Amino acid sequence: MISKYAFRIFGDLAKKMEQYFPDLKDELKKADLRISPQEYIANALFASLISFVVTLPFLAFSFSIASQSFLFGYLTSITIAIGLPIAVFMIYLNYPKSIIAQREKEIDLQLPFSALYLSSIVSSGLPLPKAIKTFVEFSGHKSVVREMEKIVYDMEFYGLDIISALERAINRSPSRKFREFLYGILSTIRSGGNLYIFLKERAADFFIEYRRKLSEFSHSMTIYTEIYLVAVILGTIFFVILTSVVSALGGATQNILGMQLFMILVFLPLVSVLFLFLVKKAQPFWE
């Protein structure tokens, strides 16, 4: 419903702006967002307009009260309200890139296990189309299955042969490693090579890289732990002890007590949350 109104209002403008975003069509395809670039730009413009209309009165009222000057509050709110729609528009346009990055990471982390499982299916003598269909039905690697499902769909509903279906999958996949993996399968089929040997070797290569990532993560965790213990925990304890000694010698107990409470109740939890976020981002696997 909202997209319909957005396209009705900004459809013509979005069509003119589409030429300035040549990569958007490919990004939407890889992000698996079933929407045309023109519609997506229209939605971004509509979201920017809504952000301007909603925030302008609120900011004007807030700044007028805070500054006790209607003119200053109005001019300040106009300045901020103009910048906000631009930020909303840029965030909206970069949203597909964030989806692509997330999907790429998920696929890359499941690819070693998926390649090994597919090689075991192919080793039974099944043709590749049936092997891929079996993989889709029984594999638990959801991100890779999602890509393989599209290959099966292209073959069963569009009547494409396996080579054409693989070519389409290579063009739309968000993962560079998965594209290279499919291209290797495609090259092996065209050259008449042994597909099982190729899949087995690629799975071994993927697992070597996976083990390397686990080793790097373990090393990073060691560094993070040392920094956290020394800089945060011991630093906070040292600060509390030092300020307690200074308070006992020179007075100003209330000010120092407030600083100690801030370090313990505010600074320490915030830094702990930051470290948890860094550890989560550094994880080479998904829970």
Image: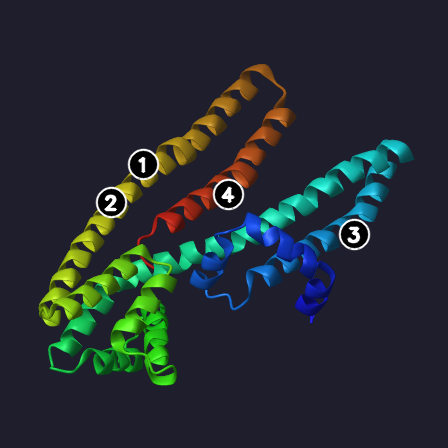
User: Tags 3 and 1 in contact by the CB under 8 Å rule?
Assistant: no
113 vs 68, nearest the viewer: 113
The residue to which callout 4 is attached is 269
> Where's residue 264, x and y in %?
52, 37
User: Tags 4 and 3 in contact by the CB under 8 Å rule?
Assistant: no
Where does the C terminus fall, quadrant-wise?
Answer: bottom left
Indicate the secondary structure of the residue bearing disc 1: helix
> How packed is label 4: few (under 14 Cα within 10 Å), some, or many (20 or more)?
few
Residue depicted at 16% across the width and 54% down the height: 208
Horizontal arrangement in the rendering, residue 206 relative to residue 166 (left or right): left
Residue depicted at 73% across the width and 53% down the height: 49
The numbered disc on residue 226 is: 1
* Marks 1/2: CA–CA distance: 16 Å
Sequence-wise, the earlier of marks 1 and 4 is 1
Residue depicted at 74% across the width and 55% down the height: 50
**In the rendered structure, which amino acid carries the disc numbered 2?**
Glu
2 or 4: mark nearer the eye: 2
Sequence-wise, the earlier of marks 2 and 4 is 2
Q: Is residue 95 visible?
A: yes
Sequence-wise, the earlier of marks 3 and 1 is 3
* Marks 4/3: CA–CA distance: 37 Å
Indicate the secondary structure of the residue bearing disc 4: helix
The numbered disc on residue 53 is: 3
Sequence-wise, the earlier of marks 4 and 3 is 3
The residue to which callout 2 is attached is 216
1 or 2: mark nearer the eye: 2
Count the labels in the image: 4
